[in-house]
Image: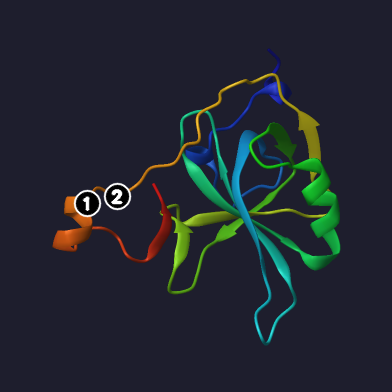
Amino acid sequence: MSANKRFHLISDLKPFKDAWRVQVKLIHSWIQNPPYADETLEMVLADQTGAKVQCSCKRTLIKRVQRSLPLGKWRVIQNVKISGTGGKYKPTNLGYKMNITNDTVFADSDLTDDSSFLSLASYNEILDGSVNTKCLIGI
């Protein structure tokens, strides 16, 4: 496999370049419409190791992204920007998030893993308060 066909894992993503190529599955998405900002499509993507990353796109790209990245389907995504996460609550534990841009390219993937990549807190973690309440989706 040539160097430009290599997939990066979500855990390898850093904000120093934009030419990332990842193979991911959309596990959850929602439209966010904050009172003082533009509408965005927020997503949680997982790679084949089960690592999860928050992903976002601006209102002008929502329809394109929804067509190109259906729920539960594996896709290859190229040319995404990586930035730091902020706010009180984060969808994932990762300190970075992906941003879909006009230059982002979507392609079909050959991967066929039917795992939901859902990791729930145990009942005891919830009762004793040791669960991370600032992370909405999980590890």
Compared across the picture, whether 124 is left or right of 107 comes to left
Q: CB of mark 1 within 8 Å of CB of mark 2?
A: no
The percent coordinates of residue 39 (x first, y second) are 74, 73
Looking at the picture, the colour scheme in use is rainbow
Please report the residue visible at 62 percent of the width from the left and 20 percent of the height from the top.
112
Q: Which residue is mark 1?
A: 123
Please report the residue visible at 85 percent of the width from the left and 51 percent of the height from the top.
64
The percent coordinates of residue 27 (x first, y second) are 58, 44
Compared across the picture, whether 112 is left or right of 18 comes to left
**What is the secondary structure assignment of the residue under circle 1?**
helix
Alpha carbon of mark 1 to alpha carbon of mark 2: how far? 7 Å
Q: Which mark is residue 94?
A: none
Q: Which mark is residue 121?
A: 2
Quadrant placement of the N terminus: top right
Q: Residue furthest bottom?
A: 36
Please report the residue visible at 50 percent of the width from the left and 35 percent of the height from the top.
116
Is 78 rendered above or below residue 126? above
Q: Residue furthest top?
A: 1
